[in-house]
Amino acid sequence: MDPLPERLVIAIGGNATHPENIRGTTEEQEIVAARAARSLLPVLALDNKLILTHGNGPVVGKILLRQYYARAQVPPMRLDVCVAHSQGGIAHLMMQGMEDELARAEHERRVACLITRVEVDANDPAFKNPSKPIGPFFSPEEARDLETQLGWTMMEDAGRGWRYVVPSPRPRKILDIDLIESLFEQGIAVIAAGGGGIPVVHRADRSHQGIAAVIDKDLTSALLANQLGVDTLMILTAVEKVSVHFGKKNQRALDTVGAADLKGYQAEGHFAKGSMGPKIEAALSFIAGGGKRAIIAHLDEALPALKGETGTHVVAG
């Protein structure tokens, strides 16, 4: 077995912060975050340098809904500010859960969270074609009402219901990379780039301006790892391995797969846009950017996947 990586970026899916089967109360989210922290403790307790990112889809959508219902009393916030709110709230719960588990294990490692801005291109075609689903699932009837009442763009998502979709430009640059790297190199577990990062665009005077969008957190995680020269990216989700022919009699799980073969499966349409598709794209982007190994695995099997015992491992070639 190869030695465990000393430098690691882990992207945690929404199931670790706000699964579909909860209402979303703070108490429920605390329980979910604590459960995720227990799953991650074996990796947190290693002698490594670690960055954790997380999704924010359900949470940022609920922030928008709260704004809609309170709009007569409180002026609504732009979407990039909503992303910042979700970053802080989710990271707080994750940090608390992880530090509690580390304390119980009598481990001295500390956890920090950083509000992170990510630069996107103001001319990215995504702004003319909203496609990123956020928030809860709705029935077709509810979706039609929201389109009429709020002017939202609603889209059916992977057969699970209808969701609000917003622009999702590609990440170009992690603006706060030097701050992240400083904590990372000290051995502090850093929670950063939550929800894909706060989207900002570069202005002519060299300043930055927030913009209404949500960036895919897996793509941002791949870029973050590439910018720091990290060799291993782990994407933790609710499935043990990536499969081709998913849901069919000839379904087959992938163990170790070369990027070229994975790109071929992608072109054949094996990975749904609303579920596994973004993770595959991020893994390929990471390898193309110089990464050595992208691992897609179940949240509860983080350490076994890191050891090569489970998960799908994407490598160059």
Image: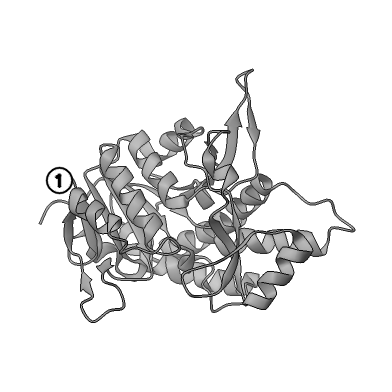
Of 306 and 195, nearer the camera is 195
Quick one: which residue is furthest to the left in this view? Answer: 1
The quadrant in which the C terminus is found is top left
Classify residue 176 as left or right of residue 26: left
Residue labelled with disc 1: 317
Q: Is residue 232 above or below residue 65?
A: above
Q: Is residue 83 above or below residue 25?
A: above
**Image coords of residue 133 (percent x, y):** 55, 60
Q: Residue at x 31, y 78 (%)?
A: 247
For residue 115, say whether it is visible. Answer: no
**Image coords of residue 205 (percent x, y):** 64, 17
Which amino acid, mark 1?
A: Gly
Classify residue 286 as left or right of residue 123: left
**Image coords of residue 295 (percent x, y):** 27, 56
Quick one: which residue is furthest to the top in this view? Answer: 205
**Image coords of residue 194 (percent x, y):** 52, 50
Density class for disc 1 (Cα within 10 Å; few <14, some 14-19, many ≥20) is few
